[in-house]
Image (spheres, rainbow, N blue to C red):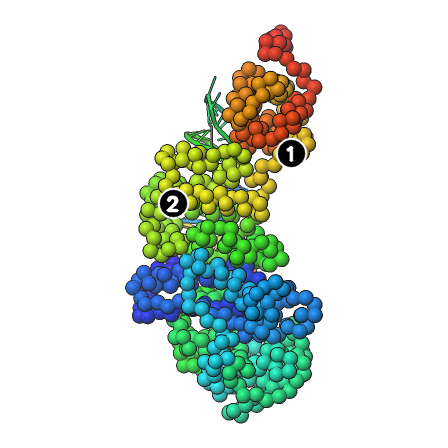
Amino acid sequence: MFWADELAAGLSGPQVVNDSKTPSGTVHVGSLRGVVLHDAIARALRDHGLPTEFRYGVDDLDPMDAQALLTPDAVDRYMGVPLANVPAPEGSSAPSYARHFVGELFMGTFEGLGITPVIYWMSELYTNGTMDPYIRTALDHADVIRDLYWSVSKVAKEPDWLPLSVICEQCGKVGTTFATDWNGSTVAYVCKPDLVTWAKGCGYRGRVLPTSGRVKLPFNVDWAAKWTLFDITVEGCGKDLATAGGSRDRSDAISRAVFQREPPLNVAYEFLNIGGRKMSTSKGTGATAHGIADLLPPELLRFLFLRHKPRRAIEFDPEGDTIPGLFDEFDRIADAVAGRPTRGELPADPKAILRQSLVDPDADVVAEAGRFRPPFRHLALLAQVPGVDVAARMAAEKGTPLDAREQAILDERIRVARAWLESFAPDRYRVVVQESLPAGIAGLTDAQRLMLGALASAAEGATPDSGAAWQDLIFGMSQTYGVSSGDAFGAVYLAFLDRSNGPRAGWLLASLDRDFVLRRLRDAAGDVPLRTPSELAEASAEDDR
RNA sequence: GGGCCGGUAGCUCAAUGGCAGAGCAAGUGACUCUUAAUCACUUGGUUGAAGGUUCGAGUCCUUCCCGGCUCACCA
């Protein structure tokens, strides 16, 4: 059974699925795993007949703690300030840093992926007083929470510590304040220069009413409070939070002890890695969530995350074979669902995986699986050859004309192939006409060189003006000079592309400057004397004697 | 130090406890218009190690080894 269905089968009654994101900057593609995973769970729950709500929250009152995108003076000014109060980068029309990176760029990918949660912003819930009762409860249980930090995670808090972050009235930072002395109506706080290493407080001391957007609960308490507020029943989290004695354990304990509520069902999930390493923003800035979402068809991106169980790390290297491999595997699963023969072992429930990958949850899976999908690698090659009617070739491969949907799939894949070749594809997928004669030409046989020279001469006379004409000419020369077609085409590829194979040679040559082609052919032929076939036969006969 | 995941063919990975497989790569061969195409075939394994459970273990249990991530500050 598909993992999300297994999960859903164990639940009953109405469900609220929740996921959250701290908007601390550019979001990379790995962060979409949580979003897609929660959406898949919500879909599976609905499939099992359970009324299900899917919520997505933005923790935009959390402090700014990533300085990658800030200028040096902005670091001093904004590190530790709630993300909702940090301005968006230059050129953005968004009202805040959080709204720019998460509200627009990251969440902008959701709808295209068929993901439509109810979205809420924590800054709004704090400001409008929704969180006030939870703040009071937390303050009343400060000693309990402090003890839980120690017993669950061995995190020691000072005896007078309160589970509360005040937004400094002087400098506006929330990450630097230390609150004490809850007297039932106000708390004291100090904005400490050295509370955390990544931000510097201003030293201000004051008292505030802990309500209505002046304060925020620490992450673990805030998390537990949300569970009660929205009656959340399922919420997964990344393994950084899910570790034993980690953040999730802390929040679970707080939920039980302070809010008297059993925490939601947890689904811990792994990250995306590049080359076995954690995905970082420094490596491949192109691997942003919105960048990859723009590149890949949505069902492929969903498929990327759904085909493996949550606890399994996913290898994703946009500059490697991940993307073509993803297309191949998707097509194989589709073949299986459509009843076409497939090789290799199939996953437990290919139909469920495919269905969950489709953007429209109500799509006809079998019909969709049956559509013709052009092999991506082949398409990537064809896309690089001028003058090829790709649609006609694909129709020929399919055997019948493409229908409208198949044409759309083809067009999209061509678009993806071009964009992929442009920005990510390994060099071996790229066809590049060499500026100068490749050194590898030395490995050609005399017969191959002779054929290339003869091809130049023949082309001068026959003036081929189309890909087909060039193709005929190459083939003819290979016949005339007794070079196998493979060796003939191989010699052409080597001379022009410095590789042993490539796109259809005739069309390639036809697309290039004619003088350049003739010159290159002659250069490749080198000093092998041009001879007619009969002279060649004579010479070869002499060699035999 | 705690936690999680992984270790299966050169690479990427699959296999309700039931004959260890696929894709790619490599190799061989076929192909008169054909180009990382197609087709056929081949090579390739002590499933990290050792014990245990079982009629039967890649799969379950125990203990190790190796790799990665993660927590122990904040979120």
Q: Which quadrant: the C terminus of chain A? A: top right
Residue at point 65% right, 66% down? Answer: A70
User: Circle 1 is placed at which residue position?
Assistant: A434
Q: Chain of mark 2?
A: A
**Is residue A257 visible to us here?**
no
| Direction left: furthest residue | A49
Q: Which mark is residue A405?
A: 2
Q: Is residue A193 above or below residue A338?
A: below
Q: Chain of mark 1?
A: A
Q: Are marks 1 and 2 in contact (CB under 8 Å)?
A: no
Q: Residues within 10 Å of mark 2 (few under 14, many from 20)?
A: few
Q: Which quadrant: the N terminus of chain A? A: bottom left
Q: Could you say where residue A497 lies in the image, as x and y percent from the top left?
A: 61, 32
* The quadrant where residue A173 appears: bottom right
Q: Is residue A336 above or below residue A34?
A: above
Residue type indicated by callout 1: Gln
Residue type indicated by callout 2: Arg
**Is residue A419 visible to us here?**
yes
Q: Could you say where residue A87 lies in the image, as x and y percent from the top left?
A: 60, 70
Q: Could you say where residue A186 lies in the image, as x and y percent from the top left?
A: 54, 90
Q: Nearer the viewer, residue A117 or B12?
A: A117
Q: Could you say where residue A43 lies in the image, as x and y percent from the top left?
A: 36, 61
Q: Residues within 10 Å of mark 1 (few under 14, many from 20)?
A: few
Residue at point 44% right, 56% down? Answer: A112
User: Mark 2: which secondary structure?
Assistant: helix
Residue at point 37% right, 36% down? Answer: A401
